[in-house]
Amino acid sequence: MTALYIDADACPVKAEAERVATRHRVSMYLVSNGGLRPSANPLVETVIVPEGPDVADMWIAERAGPGDVVVTGDIPLAAKCVAAGAQVLKPNGEALTEANVSNALATRDLMTDLRASDPFRQGGGRAFSKADRSRFLDALERVLRKAKGTR
């Protein structure tokens, strides 16, 4: 069966993902290091992994495969999941695929290097907007329909 994996630490669309997963009757895994309120929804499992760098990412990467959907803003995790055959969405609805994940990874690495070389270059991108949330809902709906058809 199709599963929906959410890299839940700092994910702004957990509630939206749960609504869509429930509508499609898809199991959803909220994976984090803690601090999440468990859902009463029987389709949603809250997975608390031990503290440590990338432990939640490793948990997801070990399980996600063809027919599954992963929601993450973490580009290295996205690259692993795409390589395993899963469909990946960022919380703003942008799909990460075989065609663009390598470029996203290279851009991420470049920006990390730029920030490290200039201590005055701080901050991230723009704030998460209602339009981002709407794009995510539309994209997740389409991706789950497609994923359920591949299993």
Image (cartoon, rainbow, N blue to C red):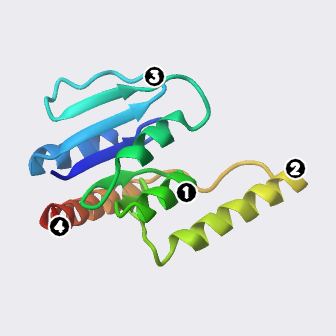
Q: CB of mark 1 within 8 Å of CB of mark 4?
A: no
Mark 3 falls on what kind of element?
loop
Gap between marks 4 and 2 measured at Cα: 47 Å
Q: Is residue 146 above or below residue 3?
A: below
Q: Of label 3 and label 4, which has the lower sequence position?
A: 3
| Pointer 4 residue | 150
The percent coordinates of residue 99 (x first, y second) are 47, 78
Badge 3 local density, few (<14 within 10 Å), some, or many (20+)?
some
Q: Is residue 47 above or below residue 84?
A: above
| Pointer 3 residue | 34
Q: Nearer the viewer, residue 133 or 91?
A: 91
Gap between marks 3 and 1 measured at Cα: 21 Å
Mark 1 falls on what kind of element?
helix
**Amino acid at the residue labelled 2:** Phe
The percent coordinates of residue 54 (x first, y second) are 57, 38
| Pointer 1 residue | 75
Q: Residue at x 75, y 55 (%)?
A: 112
Gap between marks 2 and 3 measured at Cα: 32 Å
Q: Residue at x 45, y 22 (%)?
A: 34
Q: Of label 2 and label 3, which has the lower sequence position?
A: 3
